[in-house]
Image (tube, rainbow, N blue to C red):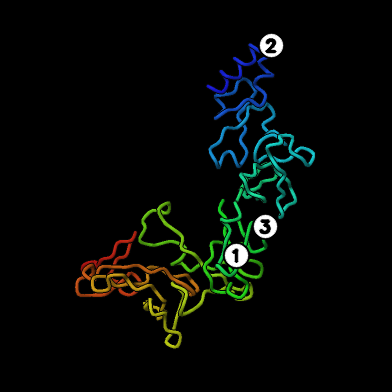
């Protein structure tokens, strides 16, 4: 209510009506506004935990509120600048934050999140730097970074398709999607995928961790292959402590293209080496390795 108290106090001394003082008064939540007024936050203000404005129409203040759409193509608050979402053509009002070319993400047509990236945050290799506004500079999840040079895109790490650029998709194996030994989905972490051409989106056998391999492909030197009862084999990263741990396939896709791997203590299955897919007597559940009694 602190925003409301300040607004009411100001209105009393200025001779304004309460309704006038409520319109566009700063707020943290609906409790800071009265009557038909609600606390309206743009996507940017919500994502950045910033105050919103009390509004009686449920819409952000066009041209005045950071992250809100422009008013007739311009920003009436001169501290804000017009930023256009290239994918839709809609324009939003953003603070520059010292950046020459702010960008928008998470745009929904009414508001967006503003991302102001200083040019020195968007750099690539020393011999191929890029700056905000360059074609290779991408804004992902509120951060700035450089797209991989065109001749190095294929099989490079990626966060999403935008990181790879036109003509490529970000392909993840089951192993790269989430770690199976993390018991709860909210605790699971995605590993980077690999940029793959649109016409060949499959994972790279023998190289990409979790991808299927065969005797001719082999695996990278940092990997070893693990096979299932179906006869399919996949490349898994070697455990850091191979004397006490061994790697097994945890689960695989129905098509058999990729799998997720799990590290088990060698003592978990006594003298046996078994997993859920390799041996009927072994239980691998919620990241736990062990054998059921014979």
CA distance for labels 1 and 3: 12 Å
Report the number of discs.
Answer: 3
The residue nearer to you, when weighing 253 against 266, is: 266
Q: Which residue is mark 1?
A: 129
Q: Which residue is mark 3?
A: 133
* Quarter occupied by the C terminus: bottom left
At a point 42% along the width and 87% down the height, the residue shown is: 215
Q: Specify whether 211 is left or right of 202.
A: left
The residue nearer to you, when weighing 194 against 215, is: 194
**Callout 2 crowding tier (Cα within 10 Å): few <14, some 14–19, many ≥20:** few
At a point 46% along the width and 67% down the height, the residue shown is: 174
Q: Are marks 1 and 3 in contact (CB under 8 Å)?
A: no
Q: Secondary structure at mark 3?
A: loop
The residue nearer to you, when weighing 19 against 148, is: 148
Q: Secondary structure at mark 2?
A: loop
Instruction: Confirm whether residue 111 shows in the render.
Output: yes
Q: Splitting the image into 4 quarters, where does residue 45 fall?
A: top right
Q: Splitting the image into 4 quarters, where does residue 37 fall?
A: top right
CA distance for labels 3 and 2: 48 Å
Q: Earlier in the sequence, mark 1 or mark 2?
A: 2
Q: Are marks 3 and 2 in contact (CB under 8 Å)?
A: no
At a point 55% along the width and 42% down the height, the residue shown is: 47
Q: Which residue is mark 2?
A: 15
């Amino acid at each position: 209510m602190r925003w409301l108290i300040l607004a009411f106090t100001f209105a009393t001394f200025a001779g304004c009506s309460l309704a006038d003082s409520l319109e566009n008064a700063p707020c943290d939540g609906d409790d800071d506004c009265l009557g038909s007024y609600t606390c309206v936050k743009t996507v940017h203000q919500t994502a950045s935990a910033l105050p919103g404005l009390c509004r009686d129409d449920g819409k952000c203040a066009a041209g005045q509120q950071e992250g809100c759409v422009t008013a007739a193509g311009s920003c009436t608050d001169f501290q804000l600048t017009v930023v256009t979402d290239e994918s839709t053509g809609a324009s939003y009002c953003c603070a520059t934050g010292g950046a020459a070319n702010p960008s928008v993400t998470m745009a929904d047509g009414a508001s967006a999140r503003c991302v102001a990236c200083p040019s020195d945050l968007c750099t690539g290799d020393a011999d191929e730097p890029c700056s905000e506004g360059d074609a290779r500079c991408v804004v992902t999840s509120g951060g700035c970074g450089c797209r991989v040079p065109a001749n190095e895109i294929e099989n490079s790490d990626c966060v999403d398709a935008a990181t790879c650029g036109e003509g490529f998709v970000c392909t993840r194996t089951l192993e790269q999607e989430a770690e199976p030994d993390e018991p709860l989905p909210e605790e699971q972490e995605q590993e980077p995928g690999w940029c793959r051409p649109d016409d060949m989106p499959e994972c790279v056998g023998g190289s990409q961790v979790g991808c299927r391999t065969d005797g001719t492909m082999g695996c990278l030197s940092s990997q070893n292959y693990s096979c299932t009862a179906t006869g399919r084999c996949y490349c898994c990263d070697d455990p850091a402590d191979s004397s006490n741990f061994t790697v097994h396939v945890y689960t695989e896709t129905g098509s058999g293209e990729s799998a997720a791997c799990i590290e088990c203590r060698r003592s978990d299955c006594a003298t046996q080496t078994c997993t859920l897919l390799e041996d009927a007597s072994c239980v691998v559940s919620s990241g736990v390795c062990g054998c059921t009694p014979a």
